Amino acid sequence: MDHMTLMVALIVLLALAFDFINGFHDTANAIASSVSTRALRPRVAIILAASMNFLGALMFTGVAKTIGGKVTDPFKLEHGLTVICATLVGAIIWNLVTWWLGIPSSSSHALIGALAGAAIASEGWNGINYSGFSTILIGLIASPIVAFILGYIVMFILKHLFANSNPRYVNRMFRTGQIATAALQSFTHGTNDAQKAMGIITMALVAGKFQDHLDVPLWVKISAATAMALGTSMGGWKIIKTMGTKIFKIEPINGFAADLTGATVIFTATMTHLPASTTHAITSAILGVGSAKRFSSVRWDTAGRILISWIVTIPVSAVMAAILYWIFSIFQ
């Protein structure tokens, strides 16, 4: 087996590891609210999330092509495989650090920041496709803002619609509704997040001269979907605790509103072929819903800590991947 084939095989394994970690890192996005309101038992919620993640991951490829070709051009990278290897290692390290600390940071931001940093380290500033990169950044920045506003609107409407209803009836109805929204949220998570690993693997196949197009092979789809589903099945309990209890006390109607909002924002991004941060979407939706319920009910100190992690993820991942590229380039 030659050096190029070994490098591509290593990248495939790293990409699947990233997808697996992304699964348990972002499990909370889909099931935190339904677990915290006891709409679903934890084990049932995780099985549901893993199954719907797998199904969603097989359905679309638009985001994969965006990741594979819009940040940097894999057809022009002189040391493309080293760039991709540094990208994945940098993103994985950041994901593990934030998971250990229980911070719901963005795997999408980590991956895109790392890819940009490694590409710049390899090719200089000309290694970045600025039009594509800026479009991705706009989508990543806009999605949490939209999720916050939409979450506020949805909760405001629901609050007034059921203001005079029996609380026990409302809780029972929306606990049932949360089963559907948790499944929908998990499905949309798969449609967007699993494609990021697919895009990276496809990018490696192009850089390694194994294919000359950015279409995602079937084996890549199945591998990425399986890795994410397995990761999801492991759960991410520290992040679930943060999402489900430390932002504000979630009731069934709030969880339903937040999940519906997050799923809507993520699926809209998928349909427009833009990578969205599922973490940012659902967290912002929870913040918007909590603000509509009562502004003072939101634990803004926790929200501020999460916001800081959002801001630093892209630059920290970029610097980390650039350093890793320079280290790896010694051996290329």
Image (cartoon, rainbow, N blue to C red):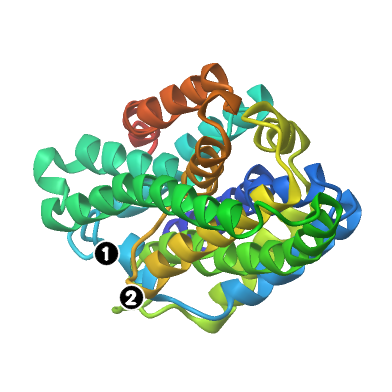
Position of residue 305 measured from the top left corner of the image (x, y, whole percent): 50, 20
Mark 2 or mark 1, earlier in chain: 1
Residue 96, placed above or below residue 54:
above
**What residue is drawn where x is 29% and y is 54%?**
139
Residue 221, placed above or below residue 82:
below
Q: Which mark is residue 69?
A: 1
Q: Quadrant for residue 115, please give it.
A: top left
Q: Which residue is mark 2?
A: 214
Asked whether, in this view, residue 211 is left or right of residue 292, the answer is left
In this rendered view, identify the residue nearer to me: 161 or 40.
Answer: 161
Q: Quadrant for residue 161, please give it.
A: bottom right
Residue contact between numbered discs 2 and 1, judged by CB atoms under 8 Å: yes
Q: Which mark is residue 174?
A: none
Position of residue 192 measured from the top left corner of the image (x, y, whole percent): 49, 64
Q: Quadrant of the N terminus?
A: bottom right
**What residue is drawn where x is 33% and y is 35%?**
329
Mark 1: amino acid: Gly
Crowdedness near tag 1: few (<14), some (14–19) or many (≥20) residues, C-alpha within 10 Å: many
**What residue is drawn where x is 74% and y is 40%?**
236
Position of residue 201 measured from the top left corner of the image (x, y, whole percent): 46, 63
- Residue 77 visible in this rendered orientation of the protein: no
Position of residue 308 measured from the top left corner of the image (x, y, whole percent): 42, 22
Residue 86, placed above or below residue 319:
below
Q: In the displayed image of the protein, which residue is found farthest to the left?
A: 126
Where disc 1 sits, the SS reads helix
